[in-house]
Image: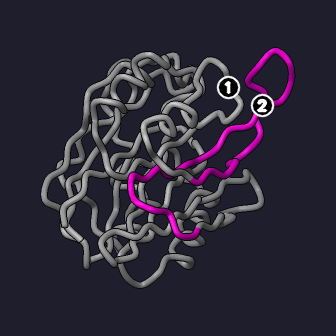
Amino acid sequence: MQLKVLSWNIWDEGHFDEIAEFLRSSEADIIGLQEVLPFSKSIPIIEFLTSLGYEHVYAPARAATLSSDGTDEMGNAVFSRHPIVSSAVHMLSDENKRVAVQADITIEGETVHVFSVHLLHTHQKVSSIQELQVENLLKVLPLEKVMVMGDFNATPESVAVQKMHSVLTDTDTTHTPTWSVYPEGCPVCNPQKIDTRLDYIFLSSDIKTIASKVENSKGSDHLPISATVEI
């Protein structure tokens, strides 16, 4: 069976109308999102995708002061048009807390294990904590039918991404850039154009990549990425 899977860091300052329009038109079977604000009135992404018929699991990745009324919550989520039969949250590091959220999805009798992750932002610098996060992620992956998608905040040549390559297959071998649509998304990095790849969809060897694409949207500082896969 073929499926369309999609991953996107929708940005805590994202533009909801553009985000919603893209996700509605994508017709993806499985979606992994990062920087989801579950209580946001301006970016009500969980309510929106639920209204389109998606089931979901969500977990807070970290706390961040994002609103004028105090500390808001931000995290990772997996949305699916197919039944989610179980879920889990995996702590990837205690310092600079990050998690992976796991959704086990049944599709025509097969169970697919889908992970949405968002690693520590290191401004594309070498980071032992980021590498630890990948190591801890790899420890919890099942042996079969695995999809890991998300914002790794790491370039293709980084140690973190190379560790992922040692276990899973990258759906996009072109290393097409995915960031930054809006340079103000990282004043420290000060990107001037979309010239850096930070986002990935990885598969276990028993899932075949049919096609992959870096999509086009101005909803976030990241571009969405997709893959057509066969399970």
The residue lying toward the viewer, choosing from 154 and 229, is 229
Q: Residues within 10 Å of mark 1 (few under 14, many from 20)?
A: some
For disc 2, the neighbor class at 10 Å (few under 14, some 14 to 19, many from 20) is some
Please tell me whether residue 139 is drawn above or below residue 189 in the rendered image.
below
* Residue in the foreground of this view, choosing between 1 and 10: 1
Identify the disc placed on residue 40: 1
| Closest to the observer, 111 or 12 | 111
Side (left or right) of 131 relative to 223 = right
At a point 68% along the width and 38% down the height, the residue shown is 74
Magenta stretch containing residue 73, yes or no?
Answer: yes
Residue extent of the magenta highlight: 57-86
Residue at point 56%, 77% (across, down): 140
Q: Is residue 64 left or right of residue 195?
A: right
- The kind of residue tagged 2 is Asp
In the picture provided, is 89 more to the left or to the right than 79? right
Residue picked out by circle 2: 72
Q: Are marks 1 and 2 in contact (CB under 8 Å)?
A: yes
**Percent position of residue 217, x then y:** 32, 23
Residue nearer the viewer, 166 or 42: 42
